[in-house]
Image (spheres, coloured by chain):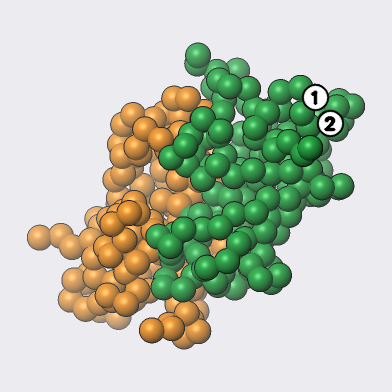
Chain colours: A green, B orange
Amino acid sequence: MRVAIQDRYPDDFAHCFGCGKHNTRGHLLKSYVDGDEVVARFKPREEHTALPGFVYGGLIASLIDCHAMATAAAAAERAAGREIGEAPSPRFVTAALNVAFLKPTPIGGELVLRARVAERSERKAVVEVELSANDVVTARGNVVAVPMPASMARS
Amino acid sequence: MRVAIQDRYPDDFAHCFGCGKHNTRGHLLKSYVDGDEVVARFKPREEHTALPGFVYGGLIASLIDCHAMATAAAAAERAAGREIGEAPSPRFVTAALNVAFLKPTPIGGELVLRARVAERSERKAVVEVELSANDVVTARGNVVAVPMPASMARS
């Protein structure tokens, strides 16, 4: 059975509004390894509107961000010789989030996010994300992920 | 009395999750002209968490996005010789949203967004945004705004 990358984030760091399993008021995004890609699906709610009929760009940026962090985690696990689910997923944070809005994203259906790692080292990963609605790519993200710094572990 | 730029968006285009006055489930961000800058203040809710103690990056990106669109609208009005409030605010949409997360943003207090237009033509505006918490700049945005295309007016 496939395990969502975010569902294996350590309990102390699983409160993200976008994708933390312990944040039930958030988006609860779930990203899954699928071959060389990482894939997530999300259905915006009616209030996630930009202009009537279209998805809010802030939500699109948020989904791309969380999906990219999960993709970086999956790549780090793969580099360590593990599959998602075998161990807690490593936690990455965003250094830079760049989103190009190619065309308006129609609201009403499911959005699909597909991501690949373009570049990876121990210090960072660059993740490229495509977001599509009705099989049309409407936004692209280029996201720089870095391992969570120790200063963010306050528990 | 100062008028928020978003409160003068036309009623048909004031449903944005981030800043539309008709979206009461959204963030209701309000941006105000302040000399050569545009300023907004926002207090994240507890659930707007990234890792415990820190503000969710997707929210930061969302606020930067909406604030930049308001800044582009204010610059267009100024170029037309009008002040905000004299006429409906023109509606811009985001072509590109680039956010650098400089350091973790502590949760609990008010965030302050300050923006300036770096470059402007009839076709687009490039807006630079600084987001700070407790007087420390924690994120910077560079946002490309374009006038709302006619294809997004579906009413």
Of B86 and B15, nearer the camera is: B15
Q: CA distance from mark 2 to mark 1?
A: 6 Å
Q: Chain of mark 2?
A: A
State the residue lying farthest toward the top. Answer: A155
Q: Quadrant of the C terminus of chain B?
A: bottom left
With B57 as the anchor, is A42 left or right in this view?
A: right
In the rendered structure, find residue A83 and report the number of the disc placed on it.
2
In the picture shown, does residue B125 fall above or below A12? below
- Residue A87 drawn above or below residue B76: above
What residue is shown with label 1?
A: A86
Q: In the image, is residue A2 above or below residue B66?
A: above
Residue found at x 30% / y 80%: B80
Asked which secondary structure carries label 2, the reply is loop
Kind of residue at disc 2: Glu
**In the figure, is residue B37 to the left or right of B143?**
left
Residue at 66%, 65% (x, y): give it: A132
Residue B146: image location, x then y, percent: 48, 73
Q: Residue furthest left?
A: B1
Q: Is residue A79 visible?
A: yes
